[in-house]
Amino acid sequence: MEMKHIGILAHSFEGATLCYRTTCLEGVRRLGPHLHPEITMTGIAMHFMMQAYERDDQTTVRNLFEQDIAKLAAAGADFFICPDNTAHIALETAGEDFALPCLHIAEVVAEQAREEGRRKIGILGTNWTMTGPVYPGALGRRGIDWAIPDEEDRRLIHDVIFDELCLGTVSDSSRDAYVEIIRTLAAEGCDAVALVCTEIPLLITADVSPLPILDSTRLLAAAAVEVAIGERPMPDWRGGPL
């Protein structure tokens, strides 16, 4: 079988590592022992983009990503995925076409929500993702309502992501706090919760969540394998507004 070469544009390393591992495991599940599509991963350290994020300078973030996308293209990747939801705010910023087409994480998650018949999705991610345009756009294009936690809860979610999860720390106290926030979203009418920071699945799993989960990390990995083996169309989005 001739398979497409997957590029992974890494950003937050815990989410990228989980996505890489899941892509390999999904290949084995679909194709057999020790077999998965070719994967090339690259990524500049998130440190170099944090100040740009803080000042909402998405153009600078996008320009830094473009350098790594070019590396993936030079390595022979046919398309790329970026297992970082906040990064897609910059990827959706207007600019020159990327060197490779991108399989958009929010489109994958929103399509799964549509297939499951979900009506209202709770969004958990960085504060930038929760208050940003990416998921309202992806869900709204499919007629799906959405909700985000209040400001205090958003601050807690954001701080746990950057102070713990992105640095490899998973704590029971943070898990308990997230579960209570999801419980609140359920009370507000959400029928699923989208884990749209790619590290959150390390903390929240289906067995502890009060709502069914949409795991953006694993959904993206599975979709990338489907593209690579020809069961999903090649993406044609090369950055900019959808």
Image: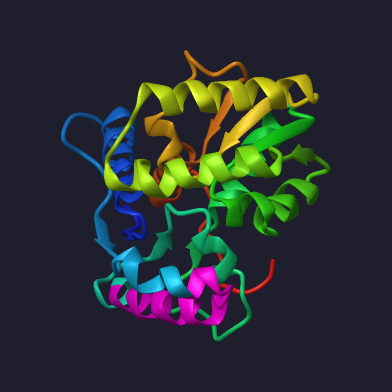
Residue at horizontal 74%, vertical 51%?
136
Residue 167 appears in the rendering: yes
User: In front: 202, or 171?
Assistant: 171
The picture quadrant where one finds residue 226 is top left
**Residue 153 part of the magenta-drawn span:** no
* Nearer-the-camera pick, 61 or 22: 61
Locate residue 133: give its quadrant. bottom right
Question: Where on the picture, by quarter, is residue 38?
Answer: bottom left
Identify the magenta region. Answer: 52-71
Residue 217: x percent and y percent?
A: 44, 41
Q: Quadrant of the C terminus?
A: bottom right
- The image shows residue 149 at horizontal and vertical percentages of 69, 37
What residue sits 78% from the left and 45% below the top?
142
Horizontally, residue 241 falls left or right of residue 236, namely right
- Where does residue 82 sit, x and y in percent of width and height? 43, 58
Check the image and report above or below for 107 versus 149: below
